[in-house]
Image (cartoon, coloured by chain):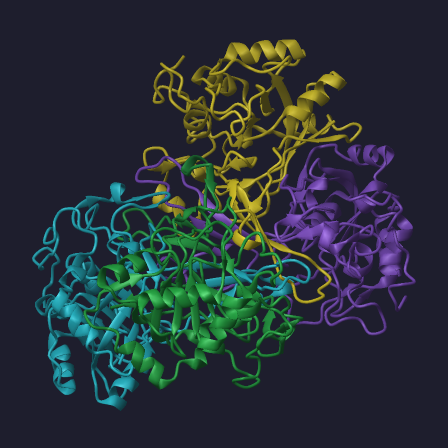
Chain colours: A yellow, B purple, C green, D cyan
């Protein structure tokens, strides 16, 4: 494993000094067409967690205790006899309970944002000017590959996921991961529900594997280990995959239903569509990645 | 035109007494496969408006005047020297500046929510229990058809859109609208930018056309006329298409880029993917509908 | 005890058809001067609960579980090297964890708001037009009287507080309650901390006592009993004192420190200042009532 | 005038290394009793601006354009036929449209918060641990003195307020400002309404005057000049009075009604009560300072 971040491969500058899309640039026309060709029956499966809001208000109108979550809602008074009901939502995007995309503007390394913009030029009190999530708002479409690291259950607590683990899963599935593919990883863990146990995590070796295979987007239920893995870069997925390789991360995904579908159909590849909401100037946004079979 | 709502066709009960998905049930396996088959190159086009948040905070840290919009954000203090930037968002879903899906729970007719649930059983102070938007969170996929009502510009102010208008656009495009298709309509209007002019709108005749053609989902830049159309049911799209036909509406869509792509490619049909965020218990949610070619 | 609300005294109309201040009108110049005269050393004691906000955001930046409370805050990013720190607060006023004033616009009885305004004319989706809390924003000043119902501890669980209880406390304190006085009651209970036990509460008999004594404002740690008191009007304090007598209620007060000061000084009367924030158009607002000795 | 901050008097350390109250410590028992003695008739006057919230939500339920303000509210759905109306508020405390108190934790000078605490120890993502506004939640009471700098109108645009200006106003009023007094200044300007003109502001000379007179709290409609005053410390009131003298500032006050009352009564001193809401861990809070005559 690589123990320091500085000798790790970097994509800063690979697509120019002003690029905001990072590894999504690896999705060539060929890769995209390969993704499109996966859509056959049109069956769709969500790779998102179900986020259950809790009430923004408490007291007489609502419970007074709750687990905090990523989304809070308040039902609105729309007027006496109004024909419509509505609500307002407060969303904390970078929360493990909501599946969300980390854009380039989310990460700061040494005072810089990919591919070398001063943090003060990237983000101000009123929002993000460089590397915001809406750069992907036209939709990301490519072939998705599910690598199920523990098809019969789940990874051991604190398991350090390596490139060899990913290779083994690909071999089990009989798939070859190609440049521009989106990598979906299932380890059978839920950071929220299982948060009191040692969480498995991606090693820098696994991130190097992503680099070598040309991964364009990462989604999975395996993130960074907690506690950090001894002898490795702490937070390898965020510090290296996002911070150096500029791979947008879809944090807090839930590939459980996807894995079940893949197993049922005997297909481990699919068309992946990531439809980031078209909201400007944020470091990330909730997403519901859809696998199409 | 039909002048009263009560004699209008209704889908209440068509899919049972407890259904929450409405006309999305019209997307049969055949319709879905027809949609999937439209994906060829994998080119994606968003049908959402770009929503520009304004700062949740004002004063010394931000502008003190602004147009209100659907989304407000505040950049968070993540700690001195923290490697990540983040924000919190306040989202008003049912706002014309953000493209959003109206779920069944949004609409109340005579104290009832589709297909006949008491409003008090559907919505409470803490959220929606029946007909919430997350019933679509596995993804809606079907064939989308763009009917461009004004390919060379935009509809006249206050234009009442009829079934004949839709037929004419379909004929121009050389497409036959089939049961289960999603209908995307472009009229060239923006309710926000053009809000000081008489807005064109759907007539009950057009909604009847949707019923006859088996439309499963509606998205467009044409909603309900403002002011209401004389002699017709006021708010026909919401009162009839959503309220009686149970067609989920994607309000505030922007099909401008889609129309340009369709014209360039000479193709007016495509795979449509609607990936509603997987957030439970709301009357609607922001969406970014993606057309795949 | 009175068992039905309709035969109970009412102040609707007593100060005209358009009044918004209710029983605060009982604070005559004489009553006000009596209050002012209580200020001697200038010692101040708060009658408010301490409300501890929890973070508006969760996830990596904050705890993921918490008791909900009345106030949530998010520290803001004010820019790299900015000289100031700031936050945004989300406040749920009518929550037992924050001491707050209930204004006339908070309460609806038979579709009407005191003193007879249609609810639809009083409140709309954008705020309160009649009976908002800011009608008191010039400050309420009068003599406050503390009646400590349980000087050596606290009331028994579920205790029904009657006029006789109030008389006994006044006799212990050697005070005569006069028209225009603010009544502060201590029973030694905290609705939040003690919420799993039967909460003592005001009976309609006690509310009648308030009427007979000309109470202008009520604050205390005793509210409505939970569960409701058998044989009495449920929610007598809110339904009768606020709803019929138009006495603004300061819910969720904490008179503990006040009681200790009164006992130490041997004084049970003081100048009371209620400084409602000068924010327009709300049904209530957080307040910090101050007793001045 | 003093041109640099470093040679300016400082109160850091004057009340110990862990103090959180700053110049409020100047309110001795004697000063407090002098304040209490000012309460005679009990007439109360607010020194706060009226803040008019705008709707948190927009779209069909509310206006789509508005000036941003310090407070946003949303009326809540409390249930069909519920007896109470309620709302949720979003408050941006440090906003010129709401009268608010700046606590010690609001200001950072050279990475330190008064009286020398590291900024990282004072504030974290979840709130303020040192110098929060609730240190004043027991109430601040002292004698208030109104110095009206422009009794017949308002200061000239961009006027630099000096100690001589304050002396002249005191002489006009026939008052002697004493240690522990609260200083209320009226210049006849409103930073929000008049924001497009050069705003008068406090010079470092005036702040030095505050130091020499032992001012405990400052409130006024004159803050820091905009644009900054040539040749003086920029932002003298915040950088020097708050940052070095540790005088809590009540920003955005409106002493107009107070000045009218003082003139009518021929009295320029009064009992001042500042009842900061009892909410823990914030850099500031909305307040409604009340003058009692």
The residue closer to the viewer here, B258 or C163, is C163
- Whether B118 is drawn above or below C127: the answer is above
Which residue is found at the position 21% from the left and 64% from the top?
D237
Q: Position of residue C91 (x, y in %)?
A: 46, 56
Res. A181 image quadrant = top right
Q: Position of residue D229 (x, y in %)?
A: 20, 69
Q: Position of residue C165 (x, y in %)?
A: 44, 63
Res. C49 image quadrant = bottom left
As drawn, is B33 to the left or to the right of A71?
right
Q: Position of residue A228 (x, y in %)?
A: 39, 20
As drawn, is A193 to the left or to the right of B81?
right
The residue closer to the viewer here, B63 or C50, is C50
Which residue is found at the position 54% from the left and 84% from the top?
C14
Residue D148 visible? The answer is no
- Whether C87 is drawn above or below C133: the answer is above
Q: Quadrant of the N terminus of chain D?
A: bottom left
Which residue is found at the position 92% from the left and 62% from the top?
B7
Residue A20 visible? The answer is yes
- Whether C223 is drawn above or below C58: the answer is below
């Amino acid at each position: 494993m690589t123990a320091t971040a500085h000798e790790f491969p970097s994509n800063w500058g690979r697509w120019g000094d002003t690029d905001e899309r990072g590894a999504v640039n690896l999705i060539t026309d060929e890769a995209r067409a390969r993704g499109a060709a996966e859509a056959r029956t049109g069956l769709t499966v969500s790779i998102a967690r179900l986020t259950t809001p809790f009430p923004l208000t408490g007291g007489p109108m609502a419970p007074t205790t709750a687990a905090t979550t990523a989304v809070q809602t308040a039902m609105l008074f729309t007027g006496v006899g109004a024909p419509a009901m509505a609500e307002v939502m407060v969303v904390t995007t970078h929360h493990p309970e909501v599946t969300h995309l980390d854009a380039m503007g989310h990460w700061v390394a040494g005072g810089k944002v990919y591919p070398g913009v001063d943090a003060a030029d990237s983000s101000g009190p009123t929002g993000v000017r460089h590397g915001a999530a809406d750069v992907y708002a036209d939709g990301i479409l490519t072939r998705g590959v599910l690598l199920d690291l523990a098809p019969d259950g789940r990874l051991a607590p604190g398991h350090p996921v390596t490139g060899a683990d990913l290779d083994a899963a690909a071999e089990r599935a009989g798939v070859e991961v190609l440049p521009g593919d989106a990598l979906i990883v299932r380890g059978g863990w839920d950071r929220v529900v299982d948060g009191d146990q040692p969480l498995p995590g991606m090693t820098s070796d696994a991130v190097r594997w992503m680099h070598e295979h040309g991964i364009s987007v990462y989604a999975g239920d395996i993130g960074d280990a907690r506690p950090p893995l001894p002898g490795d870069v702490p937070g390898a997925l965020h510090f290296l995959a996002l911070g150096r390789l500029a791979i947008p991360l879809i944090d807090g995904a839930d590939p459980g239903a996807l894995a079940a579908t893949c197993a049922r159909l005997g297909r481990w590849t699919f068309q992946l569509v990531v439809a980031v909401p078209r909201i400007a100037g944020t470091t990330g946004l909730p997403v519901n990645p859809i696998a199409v079979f």
